[in-house]
Amino acid sequence: SSTRVGVLLEEIQRRLLDDVEGARRLLDEAIQVLQAPREIAAAQRLGGGLAPWQMRRVARFIEENLEHALTVAELAAAAGVRSGYFGKAFKSSFGVSPHAMVLQRRVARAKILIAQGEDPLKDIALACGFSDQSHLTNRFHRLVGMTPNAWRRLHAALPGARGEDDGACVQLPRRAQA
């Protein structure tokens, strides 16, 4: 399993700047490899967690809708369960609350967009579902331990961080460009 994860991480690093969607898919695969099936099964027996297909569906729904406000009701609907049951089942299955997972995924997407180009942080914040640049900075610093600008400087200094077409910008959704 650790060998497979190592191979996946190398491929993710190779694709990160040229094929973000492919890197995301590989990241999802690496996460699945790392999840201990025994722990998930135990959590489902003890706490009534989500079935693996429900976990995949909710994780995909979160990834595809990060730029929108996500409610527990929407996530529960994606899993096909009642809202009242969903929060506990989600935490039992993923080990974090739905809100924490959404924030983690938003910050992960922001890291990719920040490392890829020169787009203003305010645009990246909106593209990742944060209300504004301040919200992004606050959450990013809490989860990563540095500000988005520090992250950008760090990754700009890494060899090959930008690829051959130095200065290429990420294409953000129209809403974020306004």
Image (cartoon, rainbow, N blue to C red):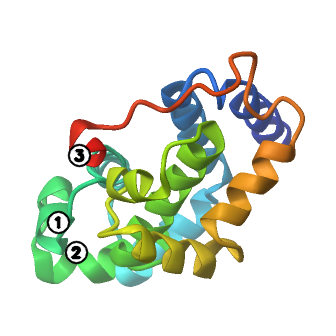
Q: Residues within 10 Å of mark 1 (few under 14, many from 20)?
A: many
Q: Residues within 10 Å of mark 3 (few under 14, many from 20)?
A: few
Secondary structure, mark 2, is: helix
Residue on which disc 1 sits: 76
User: Relative to residue 108, is residue 12 drawn left or right?
Assistant: right
Q: CA distance from mark 3 to mark 1?
A: 32 Å
Snapshot quadrant of residue 3: top right
Q: First in sequence, mark 3 or 1: give its number.
A: 1
How far across and down, in percent of the image, does residue 164 sit?
75, 16
Q: Is residue 158 visible?
A: yes
User: Relative to residue 132, is residue 36 drawn left or right?
Assistant: right
How far across and down, in percent of the image, does residue 69 sit?
20, 65
**Quadrant location of the N terminus in the rendered image:** top right
Secondary structure, mark 1, is: helix
Query: Amino acid under label 1?
Result: Ala
Q: CA distance from mark 2 to mark 1?
A: 6 Å
Secondary structure, mark 3, is: loop
Residue on which disc 3 sits: 178
The foreground one among 16 and 118 is 118
Query: Amino acid under label 3?
Result: Ala
Residue on which disc 2 sits: 86
Snapshot quadrant of residue 108: bottom right
Q: CA distance from mark 3 to mark 2?
A: 35 Å
